[in-house]
Image (spheres, rainbow, N blue to C red):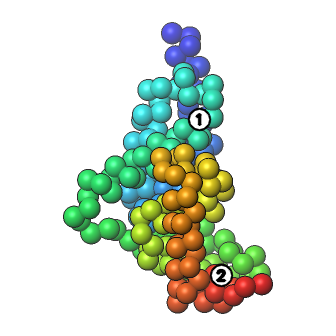
Amino acid sequence: MQRAVGRDEDFTAFVLARSGQLVHFARMLCGDAGLAEDLVQTALEKAYLRWDRIELGDPFAYVRQAVVNQHLSWVRRRLWRERPRGSAAELDEELGFSVSGRTADPSVAVDHRIAIAGALATLTRRERTVVVLRYVEDLTEAQTAATLGIAVGTVKSANARALQKLRVAPELSGSYAGEQS
């Protein structure tokens, strides 16, 4: 009984510390705030059942992988439905965030986030997932391939196609992907 209390406290501390990152990651994957919360909730439910084994390793990596798996499962089940797209309000909870780091004007940050979300929405599911894992989660090509269960070459080609699309995306004119420094 004593171990169960410690387990619950450890899990609660993990959820409090990392749930924001997980929801942000899931929102980048699926483009919908509500679905992102559902994906994270389901992944956390599964992680709780295995917490004794998970907490000894890297629990964040485990739950992040569970979120990816839940997202892929959701996509497979709902291919025939519309893909939801988040509204500007849903995609921008942190109004003071500045992508360029040059301005503190919240409206500019909102515009940047909307542009990024719009450009990501033009990518295929695989391209978007690869870009989010590579550049938002900062995984290597090998780690991304292992997470998705695909070959490293597939990650490289999907990443190259995605970056090419993002470079010419009208939403990302100027300093994002269109200009080379």
As drawn, the residue found furthest toward the top would be: 1
Q: Distance between the residues labelled 2 and 1?
A: 33 Å
Towards the viewer: 52 or 71: 71
Please state which of residues 97 and 50 is positioned toward the viewer in this rendering.
50
Q: In this view, does 15 lie to the left or right of 126?
A: right
Give how far across and how far down residue 140 sits, in percent: 66, 53
Going from N to C along the chain, the mark reached first, 2 or 1, is 1
Would residue 155 appear left or right of 180 to someone viewing this image? left
Q: Is residue 29 visible?
A: yes
Task: Using a 10 Å C-alpha cutoff, classify the residue at mark 2 as few (fewer than 14 neighbours), some (14 to 19) or many (20 or more).
Answer: some
Residue 63 image offset from top left, x and y in percent: 52, 40
Residue where numbered disc 2 is placed = 176
Local secondary structure at mark 2 = loop
Instruction: Work out whether 130 lies above or below 48.
Output: below
Task: Please tell me which residue lies in front, 5 or 145.
Answer: 145
Percent x, y of residue 167:
59, 83
Looking at the rendering, which quadrant does residue 101 occupy? bottom right
Q: Residue at x 47, y 78 (%)?
A: 118
Circle 1 residue: 59
Mark 1 crowd level (few <14, some 14–19, many ≥20, 10 Å Cα)? some
Q: In which quarter of the image is residue 57?
A: top right
Q: Identify the residue at horizontal 48%, vertical 51% (top origin).
A: 150
Residue 43, x across and y down, in percent: 44, 41
Residue 1 vertical placement versus 153 (above, below): above
Q: Which residue is drawn at 45% across and 73% down?
A: 123
**Residue 140 against residue 87 in the figure, above or below:** above
Q: Do the residues labelled 2 and 1 touch (CB within 8 Å)?
A: no
Identify the element where label 1 is drawn: helix
Q: Classify the position of the C terminus by image quarter.
A: bottom right
The amino acid type found where label 2 is placed reads Tyr
Q: Is residue 161 left or right of residue 38?
A: right
